[in-house]
Amino acid sequence: MKETNSRKAAIVGCGFVGSASAFALMESGLFSEMVLIDANRAKAEGEALDISHGLPFSKPMQIYAGDWEDVSGASVIVLAAGAGQKPGETRLDLVKKNVAIFQQIVPQIDKYNHDGILLVVANPVDILTYAAARLSRFPENRVFGSGTVLDTARLKYLLGEHLGVDSRSVHAFVIGEHGDSEIAAWTSANVSGVPLHKFCEMRGHFDHEQAMARIADGVKNSAYEIIEKKGATYYGIAMSVRRICEAIVRDEKSVLPVSSIQRGFCGISDIALSIPAIVGRDGVEAVVAIDLSPAEQEALRASADTLIRVRDEIMPLGETCESMDKPGNL
């Protein structure tokens, strides 16, 4: 097994999300080597060629299609592989299908690399992050998902539009499940240090409850709206992957709401969901205990319970899933 190379990335799954992420990472200049892996080898080769042809306009980089052994040495392995939901298929059906896919691919990755970072992007990201941690020998801090990083960006964007202010000056988080039970953490939200309600009033907005409900629904329904209009979402999540990789490769210690296995925050344990965390070269260094109202804490625990029920449904999938209770086992 090669020593980890901070300038090498691997992307598993070359669908819309994986390919867009590969393009975003090429543009970032963070890596000098990137391997693309897909069940359809020709698809991975085509994406690698297409992106490589733009390298004269970017920075030197080696981009190629590879096999499992090529994940050796990668500092970040992006897991974007997974099936889409079909008409008439339940969410639980999709969860079982994608966990079964992870049962096949994660042990293959683990044969050649368990010293890098597993960044889960495939959906449902929280359950698949939990599965990836249990199916590999990676330490828990080095297995995490994109979580609500994109949801948080959507919240900042919508608040920026609402307030007529640069969205980069908005500081707010979406926490919990990346899904219908996610929570906009309004209690800790601010604009450049000014509490959100106060800043809203400075900008002439006083109907806080109605505005918060509308914006939170806008965030939650963003993906549905995009899928209805164009069939899939991939640019926003690709930029989220780039941002997370920046924090890792540059050891930024950035606070990002990634999905990681919780060990006691708000009484939540043994399930992956999104809480702001310090992210750097070693992965998730610590969870950041942001201020939450009692109602937000209750909603977060309810979100965790939703995920726990799904987690418990997938446990009987087979021997590999049964070993998910034993961290480190394959």
Image (tube, rainbow, N blue to C red):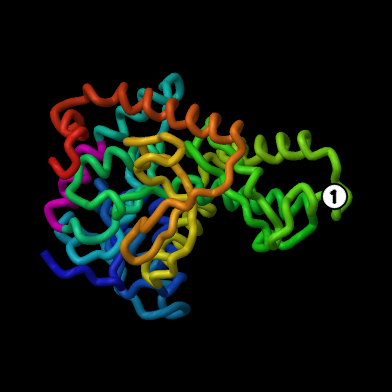
Identify the residue at horizontal 71%, vertical 50% (top origin).
159
In this view, 93 is above or below 14? above
Q: Is residue 44 visible?
A: no
What's the residue at 31%, 27% (across, down)?
96
Q: Is residue 166 visible?
A: yes
Q: Nearer the viewer, residue 219 or 177?
A: 177
Quarter-wise, where is residue 49 in the image?
Answer: bottom left
Left or right of 236, for residue 120: left
Residue sitting at x 36%, y 23%: 93
Tag 1 residue: 201
Q: Measured along the vertical axis of the image, is residue 316 above or below residue 212?
A: above
**Which residues are the magenta region?**
101-112
Rendering coords of residue 21 (x, y %)? 42, 58
The quarter of the picture where the C terminus appears is: top left
State the image coordinates of residue 224 (x, y, percent, origin top left): 58, 35
Q: Residue furthest right?
A: 204
